[in-house]
Structure formats: C-alpha cells, structure tokens
Image (cartoon, rainbow, N blue to C red):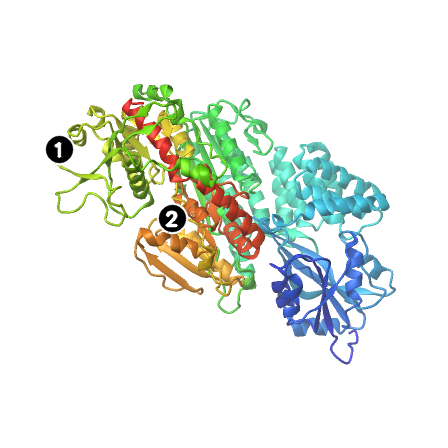
Amino acid sequence: MPLASQSPPRLSLVMIVRDEAELVAEAIRSALPYVDEVVVGDTGSTDATPEIAASFGARVVTLPWEDDFSQARNRALAYARGDWILSLDADERIREGDPDALRRTLARRDLWGGIVRIYHRLDPPSAGAWDNVLRLFRNDPRVIFEGRIHETVDASLARIPDTKVLPVPLVVEHLGYLDAVVRKKTKTERNLRLLEIALAERPLDPRLHYALGTEWFALGRYAEAERAFRKALELLEGEPSYLPDLALKFLFTLFAEGKTEESHEWARRFLERFPDFPTLWEMYAQLLLRHGKAEEAVRAARAALALGPKTAYAIPEGSGSFLAYSLLAQAHARLGNAEEALAASRAAREAYATATERNGGPASLSAELFALPFLLRILEQNSESSALFLGTSPILYQSLYAVLRELSTAGVLTPPLLFRPLVGQKLTSKVPSARVAVVSDGRRELSSEDLRREIENILNAGVETVYVVEPFSEYSGPRIHLTALATWETSRIDVTPPPLPPQSVTKPSARASSGNTGIRNFVHVYRISRPPSFAPIPPDSLWENCPEATATYVPEEFLTTKDRQAAEPDRRGTERSTGCGVPRSPLTIGYVLPHHAPTGGLKVLLDHMRLLRRLGHRVIAFYPGDGERPALPPWYPFTAEEKPEEVYLDPRRSLPEQLDDHDLDVAVLGWLEHLVGAENARTPLLYLEQGHPWLFQDIPPAYDHRVRLSLLQFYRTPVLLATVSPFLQDILRKRYGRKSALVPNGVDTDRFRPNEEIRSANDPPTVLLVGSPHRPFKGTDVALRVLDRLWQEGLRFRLLWISPDPFRILYAPYPAEIVVDPPQEKLPHLYQSADVLLFPSWYEGFALPPLEAMASGVAVVASECGGIRTYARTGENALLAPPGDAETLAAYVKRLLRDAPLRSRLIRAGRATARAFDLRRTIHRLETVLRCVARKK
C-alpha cells in the first residue's frame, strides 16, 4: 500500500472568473466542505462577481486578460498556499463526494493528479452526459496549465517522472451547456477566436483541431466539424485521452452528413481500438439501422448492453443501459419481432427508472417512447392511406418501420423518403402524397417558430392531418402550444409518462442543490388539420370600401405635448371637424354588455363608451335586467358627462328586435351568444372579438365537437366583425374565412403614468402579477414556479398580486400582498409601486395589463401569448419568453431586477409604446370602423 503523509493535505480551490455573479456563489458554496482556502482570479468583471466571491471568504485577485486561459490560471495558482489544487469554473459545483475520503486519497505520496467525474447538465432538463477530467493536482511549480484555450495540466504532469493519476471520490456538475446559461454568454464566438489564434501559433497540434471541431459540433455545423476532426486524426500521434470522444464525434458528423459508407468503415476501425466503449457500439447500431441492417444492429445494441455504463469513458446518461435497450427495440421493430421489441422497450423504461432514482432527477430517455402506443393507433386508423413520419428522434420514426410494413405501406414510401430529419428540409415541394404526418423534435433542435413553420409547410403541401409529439417539463414548457397553432384546427391530447418511482428516503437526493429535483415531465400530442375552405360572406365586402378600418395599426413615435392636445377628443360639442372643413354628424351607438365582472374585456367596452361620449356621440348601454340593477357595472368610474344611457333587455324578446326599437346607427355586440339571430337585425351590427379560450381551442375534450360546431355557426353569421389585434384577425381569416376590422386596445396614459416617488430605495423590488388564479390560461401556476425558483436562487423581492377574484396563498417563502378587485382609481397607484410585471399567460387576444404596465413605468416580462405581439417587441420594450417556459421567464425577471440600465431602457421604450396606443388615438380608429358599419361618413 502506498505510504500516506503524516498530516492531512491542505486543499486550495482556484478559479478564474469574469461576470459570473449569477453562478459563482453556488460554485464556491459547494466546495467549502472540501477545501481550506478559495482563490478567485478575476479577469475584468463588470458585475458583482468579486464582491460575491469575497463574501464567502475567498481571496480575490485581479488578473490581466491576455486572450490566454492558461496564463490566467497559472497566475491564479501563484496565490494558492495549499498542498493540492482543485480547479473549478463558476458554472460548476460539487454534486457528490466525501471530504474525509478525498483527503485520505490525496494523502498518498505517489499520487500527483486526481480525475473527477463530471456530469454535464443539458437541455432538455432530462438530458445529461458524463465525463472524466483531471481537476485535482499537486501545488508544484512544475505542474502548470498549457494551451491558450481548453487548457489542461495533463502535459506538464506527464513530463514529471513517476507521477500517478487516479480517479478520486468527487462528482462535479457542469451547467455551462444549459440553454439558459449559453444564451447569456458569447463563449462560442470567443472560443473560435482564441482557437484561430492558437492554430496560427501551432497549426500541427491535433488537440487544437479536435477542440475546433468540438466548437463547430456544438453549433450543429457538421461539415466544419468533420474537417477539423479529420485533420486531428491525420496529425494524431499515440492515443491521447481525448481520442474516444474524437472518434465518437467524428462518426456522428459523418452520420449527420449522410456519408454512410465511410462512417461504417471508421466505426469498425474505432471499435477495434475501443471494443469496450458502449456509446461507440450504440453509434454503430444507429449507422446499421440507417442502412437497414437490423440484424447487425441487434448485435451492436447487445454488445453495448453487455458492456454496461463504462466510467472510463465520456458517455451520455443511459449509455450501455436504456439507450442501448431503446436501439435494440428499434432494431427488433425493423425486423418485425414484436415481442422482442416490446420486451426491449419495457427494459428501457425499467433502466430509465433506475437511473432516475440513482441520479435524483430525470435522465435522458426520449419522451416519444411514452407516446409510441398512441402513434401506433394512428397508423392503424389510417392503414389504407400513406403516412409520413418526420422527426429528430430515431426512437419515434425508426421504431415504426415494422408497423408500416405490416400495414402494407412500406412499399409506397421507401425508408429514405419516409424517415428524414426536420432540420434543413424544404418540405413544401417534396412532401409525398400522405394523409397523415407525425412530427417530433424530441432532441429540441428547432426553435418554436421553426417548428411551427415546418408544420405549416407540411399542411400547405397537402397533408390532411399532422400529429405533433411535444415532450416538455414544467420548467421548460412546450415550444409548440395552442397560441402558435391558433390559425389551424388544433386539439391537444395529453400523453403523460408513467410516474417515476419515489426517490430513496434513506439517501438524500444528490441533485437537491441543483434546483431540479422533482421536475415533472409531460408529453402533449397535438392533432392539427387544415380548416375547410369557405365562401366569402357578403357583408365582409364592406371592408373593401373602408380599407382604413382593416389596415395595420402603425404606432407613430410618442407624442409631444402639442400633439397630445391635438389628439384630445373634443369635449365641447356634438360635431367634430374631419380636418377638411366638413363636419361629421354624431352617431347613435348601442353597446350590448356581456356581464358585469371586472374583466379586461369588459373594461375595454366601457372605455369605448366613455370616450365615444366625449367625442359627442350618443351611446346606449344594453344589459339583461329588470331595472332593479343598473345596466352599467358600478365599479367603472363614469363621470356624469361620460355616462351612457341605460336600457334593460327583456329576456323574452330577441336581441335584434329590441335593438331595432332604438333607431341605432350601429350596435356593438360584446359576446358570441349575442350573434344568435343577429342576421335578422335591421340595425347594422358589429361583433368585437377580443379572444376567449374556445377561440384558442382550449376546449374540454368532452365538449370539443359541439363547441367547434357552435363556433363555426357563430363566426359564419353574416354580421361584420372587428378584432383587437392582427393575431385575432389571422385566426378569423384562416379558420372561419372572415375578414375583420382592426380596433386595437389602448391605455389612458394620463391615468397610467410613471411615479418614481412611490418607490423607496430601501424597499425590496416588487414583482407584479395581474390575473385570477382561477383562470388557468393566465398561467399563474407558471408564475409561482418562476417566483419559487428566483427565491431559491437567492433573489429577494416582494410579490404584489392583483386579482378580480378572491383567493388565498397557502404558503409562500416571499412576502406577498394580494389585492382583490381594487377600485379602478387605485389601479394606476398599484402599477406604479412595482418594478417588474410578470405576465405568463398562455394566450391572450391583446394582453392589456402589460400595456398598462408600460404606461406606468414598469418593466415587462411576459410570455409570447399571441395578441401581445401587437405592441411588444422582445429586447426593445419588453422581454418575452415562450408560454410555460418558467426557466426563461425567471432568468428575465432576475436580469431586469439586477440590470438597472436595461430596466430603464425598456421602461423608456415601453412608455413610448403606451403613448402610441393612447386611448385618445385608438378611439379614432374605432370611430372610423363604426362609421363604416353605419355607412355614415
């Protein structure tokens, strides 16, 4: 047994950092139980990174940055006083280990280096990969980092005689590959620039060419990656530690580029050198499946299973386990061995559950596996016609080949045409004649907009129905959602994976500190089809004579004081000039109110009535009642001058008949059911569509068919339509064949305006929520996940929640104030007291609260919920995230609360946007539309 030193060795954590305020605290905190001192070399931070590091007792030194990582790390090493060095980056943290066992290992006199096991967290949250990296070494002047980039101490250690390097009991988690981290940094551009410099200095260094290929590989630019990997292989001498990873990535680039014959040859050569590398066997199995050599693929998958997870190699989670089982299932499916395929699938799920319990969080089994039985039923139902399958996950589209053969469709669609990736394909002109398509992007290679565009391409190419398999977690959210698919006939089928086994109660989760424990994962399957073709409805021809009513609303630059006075509605008379010396006669306008609840939709109608009165028009409010209750809701603050007349509707008589009694020039209908019998009215009618869950196809399955038939009947009623956003215009046009006027919502920028005096510099920042938790589409469950995440990450704030409905928060770690149904006069004050509005709705026809927040000088973080695109532009006047993406929403809120210059810039732009949508401007668009409907200029 090697001798140990008399006293326990001292261990120094040495880091180099720059602008890592969001990550450095957790990195240092995780290492404190293991180290005796912390040295942090700062290379030019502009944020609070040095102060945060110093708060943990770190010795922070300022280092020059000379475009060379090894120089910076070696300068930092000079400040370390321990016997051993532990090197960590700010985006890493110790996930698992035993401090006493580590010190006993480092006490060995013959040991010079320690290899730690690194777990790379990846997106989606279920993914991950393992690696082995030398991160512990003796504090000796001969041991130095080498390499301008991707620097290591391996070479300097190798030059010291009789040095031994062994694995040590330490597991490190790396977060640097997560999308949320990558988006905030420009590491790729920096790395490519430094590699270019390094290659100019050492053009024959194979490790640099391997590093360059790895950067291109991460970007998905496989042609560039292949050239770099090929050059590294040409220059290679001996067998460096990175050769297995180089071999695997080089094979994948050949696979991705379709160079199948060459990839086979290289795979055989690499397997001769690394026969115990399970991931290499799995890559070979995928190559064989692409070639249709299913029997050989079975043998390759079994070889991977026989090896199991090999810790000597860098491998993805599940290699030699459930990934190999899933490939085995695909190969058996290709051969038509149904029982073997099902058995392998069951084994994959069991191995997946085991890995999940071991890691304390989800592992990287593709979620499409859970949706496979559903997709097989789709095939059975469409067995008499062609079916097209596209995706980025082989688990989905390769596993179905045997079923297609059983259904006698394999002869119609050959595998190269049938199974192809979505990425890079121009499908519009090449989609075969197919009735059904199934699309999956299980590897999340496409953005939400790209995936939506591909779906539209498929439908436009003639496919009748598309099924989209969308795996997601409660933190990442689905990228394809009802808002993105609102212009198509869409229904959602929830396919949730079976519950995972409970984590062991005897062993605490190793991932508890990552904040990812207990994340739920889901699968949605969306059924999407083209709407039917409709003949034009005669009344819609009116809009051709009033193009100004349907035109896009183009907000101008924010108004000057003089402009605002000119835009102020005339309060004095009943006539206004057209600007050409021709007076306009006032209109008699009726508004049929749907309810009295304090909703944004009703508030819009009441704002219309108030401002139309100020323009001199006669306005009548219609509401069902017996005269004992007012027709107007008591919560809206009309002045005597602005208050409309009130008329009570008799439920025994039809609405059109009663409207006709009042000699109206035009009547505005506020809800769908007001369209019943409306075709019989003599009064010109206008239905104002502001959006509702049914229109966004958020329909309970039990009522889906009946609701869709009712919507079709309503929207095809020959009554003129107007909407509050271009988003709703598109839905009505594409799904119901209707042309509609555009009357965008507005905000009173005199009432809703900034007031910096309300906030105190000593107060914690305030996050504002607006919406009822009883209305699921408002996304308040997403908001609570966002706030919990921020609090767990150390951000301190207070919550101000405005809701029209009463409720209680049973528990919240942060201070929270709930304001239920506040008076309208108090709303501006509540907005002004906030720093950031969090608005996570799944869908909205317009989204008025963010516009009110902009007017009030509040920065906006919101979801891309459809109608908000009327005025919000991410990065310009707001920060927008995909609906349900709690992780991105949390990152945006944190960024705004910590980045005062960005918050100020968004606030200024938001105020300008609000002034462009001032009610006193948008009301003139409404007046134009009403005159068109009344046929009075």
Q: Are marks 2 and 1 in contact (CB under 8 Å)?
A: no
In the rendered image, residue 476, in percent from the top left (x then y), is placed at 50, 49
Judge the density around disc 1: few (<14), some (14-19), many (≥20) Cα neighbours within 10 Å. few
Q: How crowded is mark 2: few (under 14 residues within 10 Å), some or many (20 or more)?
A: some
Out of 337 and 386, give the one closest to the viewer. Answer: 386
**For the view shown, which residue lies furthest in the bottom direction?**
6
Q: In this view, does 285 lie to the left or right of 244?
A: left
Number of marks in the rendered image? 2
Give the residue pinned by disc 1. Answer: 653
Identify which amino acid the numbered label 1 is placed on: Arg
Q: In which quarter of the image is residue 538?
A: top left
Q: Mark 2 points at which residue?
A: 751
Q: Which residue is drawn at 58% across and 34% down?
A: 421
Residue 404 coordinates in the image, percent (x, y): 49, 31
Q: Which of marks 2 and 1 is in front?
A: 2
Q: In which quarter of the image is residue 130?
A: bottom right
* Mark found first going from the N terminus, 2 or 1: 1
Residue 535 rendering spot, x and y as whole percentages: 34, 19
